[in-house]
Image (spheres, rainbow, N blue to C red):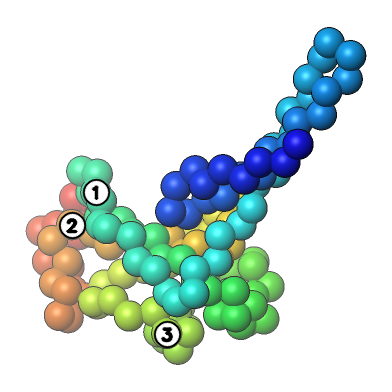
Amino acid sequence: WLKRLECDAHWRKQFSTKQTSSQSLLVCVAMVHYPDEIEYSDKYQDSSYEYRHVLLPKNIAKEMMRLTSGRRLLEEREWRNLGVQQSRGWEHYEIHRPEPHILLFRRLLGTDPNTGRVPDAIRGGA
């Protein structure tokens, strides 16, 4: 039997159950979700940074992998050239290896979104 279950907006899982005598075998395969266009998460924060993640469509993710081989963070000009649009001050800070098409961004709280500058008083505390 094969059932398809939509878990949330970003994940799809495929479940397959096979009956063998009195046992059941459940196999779960994660399906990577590539959006049709660039998707932006809401911002979230901790005591020092605000964060957001950006999901890339498959064609843009391939271009990113061509640039970096998935081994380094993108510089601002690179992610902007890929079509990512957001205010100033964001840094691509981590590569999530299972899902390299999801870019993880952060910026210090208090960063001016027009200039990308962080006030000295804030920079010294982070």
> What is the C-alpha distance between the residues marked 1 and 3?
24 Å
Identity of the amino acid at label 2? Leu
Residue highlighted by disc 1: 45
Residue 3: x %, y % from top left: 66, 41
First-in-chain label (3 vs 2): 3
Q: Secondary structure at mark 2?
A: loop
Residue 59: x %, y % from top left: 60, 80
* Point 56% across, 60% down: residue: 33
Residue 8: x %, y % from top left: 44, 47
Q: Nearer the viewer, mark 2 or mark 1?
A: 1
Q: Are marks 3 and 2 in contact (CB under 8 Å)?
A: no
Label number found at residue 109 = 2
Q: Nearer the viewer, mark 3 or mark 2?
A: 3
Looking at this rendering, what residue extends furthest in the bottom direction? 81
Local crowd size for mark 3, using a 10 Å CA cut-off: few (<14), some (14–19), many (≥20): few
Local crowd size for mark 2, using a 10 Å CA cut-off: few (<14), some (14–19), many (≥20): some
> What is the C-alpha distance between the residues marked 2 and 1?
8 Å
Q: Nearer the viewer, residue 49 or 15?
A: 15
> What is the C-alpha distance between the residues marked 3 and 2?
24 Å
Q: Nearer the viewer, residue 73 or 12?
A: 12
Residue 21: x %, y % from top left: 89, 14
Q: Quarter-wise, where is residue 117 in the image?
A: bottom left
Residue highlighted by disc 3: 83
* Point 24% across, 49% down: residue: 45
Q: Secondary structure at mark 3?
A: loop
Q: Are marks 2 and 1 in contact (CB under 8 Å)?
A: yes
* Count of labels in the image: 3
Identity of the amino acid at label 1? Gln
Identity of the amino acid at label 3? Gly
* Point 24% across, 77% down: residue: 88
